[in-house]
Image: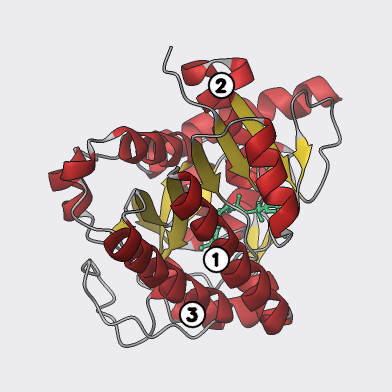
Amino acid sequence: MKKEKILIIGANGQIGSVLTNQLRDQYGYDNIIPSDIRVPDHDAPLFERLDVLDKAQLHEVVKKHTITQIYHLAAILSAKGELNPKWAWDVNMNGLFNVLDLAKEKKQKLFFPSSIAVFGPEAQKENTPQYAPLTPTTVYGISKVAGENWCQYYHKKYGVDVRSIRYPGIIGHESLPGGGTTDYAVEIYHAAAKGEAYTSFIDKDTRLPMIYMADAIRATIQLMEAPSEDISIRTSYNLSGMSFSPIEIAQSIRAHVHDFKVTFEPDFREEIAQSWPSSIDDSRAGEDWNWKAEFDLPKMTNDMLKHLKERYMTAV
Ligand code: NAD
Ligand code: SER
């Protein structure tokens, strides 16, 4: 077992809840401290209720558990952020500053998740390169561009070992998404597994970059465990899993649920999706730390439906 003590901030969310379990398997149960502003609705040993905007409380938790690494996942995502832009900016930026200052002072290794939301309409849409123009249209995207650059600044100026990935939309059966534009791609599987129809808030032909949870978690830990000298990008790495539109995911589901019905009622999230890439060039992640996705759309659909059907059948 590695001798690390890891704090996860935002551990009650879609990614954090899965990452907590994976890190516990790899580093030992007691070495992972999940924290969140929301207390979980199940029994959660070692959980700390923590608001990342409360600097004193953050320092207290880190001291109490002698933390050596931080995964800072707490953020307000793209769709929720547009409903309250100043709140999203406050949580996303001031939360990050608190964590960066702490990592600088205590010399902790830090993970900061960025997003495909850093790209805007000026970026090449297909196979978007690592160094495309970053002109996001959402407050979430603006906060992630600023966050990535602050991470690089703290690395160059103060030697903070901060690492980051621009996640595509993440899809998993273990947890529910928390207010993003790509949430439809999780909801659609739940509807299909329950035998229900689905109404998509993203239009039928809008293709977005996505990734299966298992791949996203593997990429995250792989990046965090890579030798420091291999990390040539200290803003954030492009990462890719697969790309599809609502029509394509529905077709993939129909291979298992033949009568699955989908209708389309695009809302404000469609405009956000239109401003993002359709597919991502993640070759730098492959070159620097051997990243390669394992799940494509058919493989993900198979796994998602298997797990969700089991869950809903047991619930009956
Ligand atoms: P989520 O919304 O499911 O979880 C975020 C968690 O942060 C929530 O549990 C929330 O309670 C917590 N939180 C909010 N404000 C907080 C505060 N002040 N203090 C402490 N905790 C607070 O989000 P997620 O999907 O798990 O995303 C995690 C990270 O990954 C975010 O930074 C997000 O921007 C990034 N990301 C996610 C995706 C995706 O598709 N899920 C894609 C790209 C990037
Ligand atoms: N899945 C995220 C969102 O839609 C992308 O960062 O907000």
Residue pointed to by mark 2: 24
What residue is shown at x 51% (from left), y 69% (from top)? 204
Q: Earlier in the sequence, mark 1 or mark 2?
A: 2
The answer to whether residue 12 shows anywhere in this view is no
User: To which residue does mark 3 refer?
Assistant: 142
Residue 114 versus residue 41 in the image, above or below: below
Identify the residue under disc 1.
97
Q: x, y (%) of residue 222?
A: 33, 34
Label 1 CB, ligand 1: below 8 Å?
no
247 left or right of 244 in image: right
The residue at the point 49 percent across, 52 percent down is 105
Q: Earlier in the sequence, mark 3 or mark 1?
A: 1
* Residue 143 appears in the figure: yes
Q: How is the image coloured?
A: secondary structure
Q: Residue at x 44, y 61 (%)?
A: 114
Q: Look at label 3 and name its amino acid.
A: Ile
From the top left corner, tell me how far across and down residue 284 is, in percent: 17, 54
